Amino acid sequence: MSFVIGYLSFVICHLSFVICHLSFVICHLSFVICHLSFVIGNKLKVVRFVNYHIWSLSTLQNTLGNFWIFFPLQNNTNLVRSQSCLWN
C-alpha cells in the first residue's frame, strides 16, 4: 500500500513539474513574441522616420526648384544688374 501511495505522489509531483515547465515555456514564448513585436515596431518606426525625412527633403527640393523657376538667374545677369545698381 505504501508503494502505491509513494508512486501516486511521484506521479503527482512529476505532473506538477511538467505543468510548471509548460507554463514557463508559454511565458517565455510570450516574452519572445512581445520582444519581437517591439523590435519590428521599432524598426518600422525607424523606417517611417527615414521615409518622412526623405519625403520632406524631396518636398523641400521641389519647393526650391519651383522657387528658382519663378525667379531665375540666367547666367547671373539679374544678380549682376542688381549689384551694379547698388554701386551707382
Image: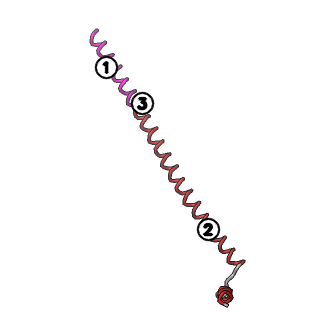
Mark sitting earlier along the chain (1/2): 1
Front-most of 38 and 23?
38
Q: Residue at position x 46%, y 38% from top?
A: 30
Q: Earlier in the sequence, mark 3 or mark 2?
A: 3
Direction left: furthest residue: 3
- Circle 3 SS class: helix
Q: Nearer the viewer, residue 1 or 36?
A: 36
Identify residue type, mark 2: Ser
In the rendered view, does 13 fall on the left or right side of 42?
A: left
- Percent from the top left, x then y, of residue 53? 57, 62
* Quarter that holds the N terminus: top left
Residue 29: % across, % down? 44, 38
Q: Which residue is mark 2?
A: 58
Stretch of the chain drawn in magenta: 1-23
Count residues near mark 1 (Cα–Cα under 10 Å), then give few for <14, some for 14-19, many for 20+.
few
In depth, the one of 7 and 42 nearer the eye is 42
Q: Which mark is residue 10?
A: 1
Quadrant location of the C terminus in the rendered image: bottom right
Numbered disc 1: secondary structure: helix
